Image (cartoon, rainbow, N blue to C red):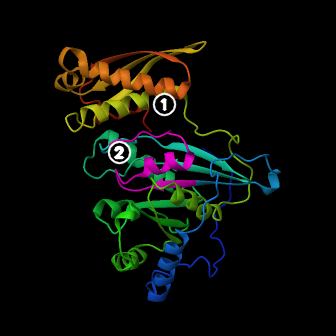
Amino acid sequence: MSTGKKEPKMPPKSAATPSAQPLDQGPDQDAIGAMLTQALLSRGAAVPADNAAPAASIPPVGEQRCGLIAIVGKPNVGKSTLLNALVGQKISITSRKAQTTRHRITGMRTRDATQFVFVDTPGFQTRHSNALNRSLNRTVVGAVNDVDLIVFVVEAGQFNQADARVLSLLPEKIPAILLANKFDLIHRRAEIAPWLKEMQERHNFAEFVPMSANNAKDVERLFGICEKYLPLQPWMYGADELTDRSDRFMAAEIIREKLFRLTGDELPYTSTVLIDQYEEEGNLRKIAATIVVERDGHKGMIIGEKGEKLKRIGTEARHELEALTGGKVFLEIWVKVRSGWADDEARVKTFGYE
């Protein structure tokens, strides 16, 4: 997506927003302490009574602020949960299975004069090198080089090789926020200060944000932190738009989420969902979908005994689709075997991956 924006700039330094030290000097202990203190104090800031209220009127173009914010991190670190919380509606599916997010999904939230355009990315894949994973990784690399701000999500107090691989992709020219998710599991400041110092040595983070993606107060605070990094420019989307993805895309994603959640670890990650038909007739939507797997054994896992597993997948998907669309949904799901599809570049592209 072309935004026509200028290269993003860091906001001016101030005592209220401690800045990281240059990498060649190493982070000063006082600066680390100040950053940690500011971050912890800001967690106690008051939250407006209605944090979801839309702007009463659209401000003049010259006063509008808008920018792209990439949410990146290793698989299963909470990126999609965070995106849904920021947008205020579920637009990115979640499950315990790695590779749940496979596409660059854009979610928008417009508040007062500022439009936040969040880009959720797949977790960077290091375990497998098939065509599907190469596609997912290209999506991540492309996203981090075309934004105004990067939110690097990591579990508070943790850092491993998967985190390091994603961190190595972050360009120095774009400001990055270190978002320590699941911070509610950290009980003492002494437990996090050495880790924060180590993280600042790894990358020149602009700010440190301790939070929980499930905490509304923390999510609200993140808006204020991100806003100052976004340039003054016209909004990219309408004030009430929430995502750039179609209903057809969302239908496929919802079915895939139910597939992953109801099959657990039994089913390999190399399964996908294609929408063969999506028709609207008044308040009714007729949807025909195909679940694609690589082996006959996988097909049996999905269908289940007497078709009960597939029936449950369809029922749960239909209920969520009806809640999303506000109408009735007639849903048919088939299961087909396409051996080796995940390692076939042409077929991966045909199935809608970048």
Give percent across and percent down for residue 345.
35, 35
- Which residue type carries mark 2? Arg
Give percent across and percent down for residue 16.
62, 78
Q: Was residue 93 drawn as part of the magenta stretch in this picture?
A: yes
Distance from the alpha carbon under mark 1 to that under mark 2: 23 Å
Residues at circles 1 and 2 in contact by the CB criterion of under 8 Å: no
Residue 166 in which image quadrant: bottom left
| Picture quarter with the C terminus | top left
Mark on residue 134? 2
Kindly state the secondary structure of the residue where label 1 is placed.
Answer: helix
The residue that appears at 40% across and 79% down in the rendered structure is 197
Residue 174 as seen in the image, left or right of residue 158: right
Q: Which residues are magenta?
A: 69-95
Residue 156 in which image quadrant: bottom left
Residue 231 as seen in the image, left or right of residue 204: right
Q: Earlier in the sequence, mark 1 or mark 2?
A: 2
Residue extending farthest top: 281
Q: Which residue is mark 1?
A: 250
